[in-house]
Image (tube, rainbow, N blue to C red):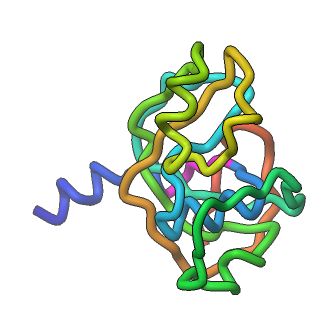
Amino acid sequence: MGLIIEKEYAFLEDRAVCVSQPWAGLLVQGAVDIIMRRRSTRFRGPVYIHASRGFSDQYYLHDNLHSLNPITMAARGGIVGHAEIVDTVFYRFQEQWDADISRHRLPSSEFRKGRRGWIFANAKTVPFRQMNGRPFFFRVPKE
C-alpha cells in the first residue's frame, strides 16, 4: 500500500505552480477551486501551490471568510500547500462564468470571453517553505 501512495504522489515531490495571493491562500484553504490562468494545461495530478511575491488586487469575496488562516493568506514567496489539478474550463459565455462564481470568486463584471480556469481538488495547506517561483510549472528541489 505504501508503494502505491508514493508512486501516486511522485510528481508532488518536484512540481509546483505559482499563484498570486490571495488566490493561493484561498485555494489551499478550500475557499476557491478554480484559479484563472492565461493558458490551459493538459497536466492532471498533484502539485505544490507556490504563493508568488506579488499580490493580486483583483480580490473579490462574496461572503465572510473569517475562518481562513491569516498567516497562510499573507504568506508570499514560497510553498503554502498542495492540490490536484483535475480539469480546466474555457469560459465562452457569461452564464457559464456566473454559474461558477462561488468556485472562482470573481464577479460577473470580470467575465471576458476566452478566460481559462484550472480546476483543483483535494487542496491542503503545508508548512510554509520559502523559495523562488517561476511562471507556469517549475521543479521544487527536495529539502
Left or right: 112 with respect to 63? right
* In front of the other: 135 or 35: 35
* Image point (50%, 38%), residue name: 100
Answer with the quarter of the image where residue 69 lies: bottom right
Counting from the top left corner in percent of width and height, residue 39 is at 68, 23
**Residue located farthest toward the left when viewing the structure as drawn:** 1
Relative height, residue 68 to residue 115 (above, below): below
Q: As rendered, which of 77 and 59 lies closer to the eye?
A: 59
Q: Quadrant of residue 112?
A: top right
State whether residue 84 is above or below residue 97.
below
* Membership of 16 in magenta stretch: yes
- For image coordinates 84% across by 54% down, the residue present is 56
Query: Was residue 38 drawn as part of the magenta stretch in this picture?
Result: no
Q: Residue at x 28, y 58 (%)?
A: 6
Using the image as rendered, state which of residue 135 and residue 33 is in the foreground.
33
Q: Quadrant of the N terminus?
A: bottom left
The segment highlighted magenta reads: 13-17
Q: Quadrant of the C terminus?
A: bottom right
Q: Residue at x 55, y 52 (%)?
A: 14
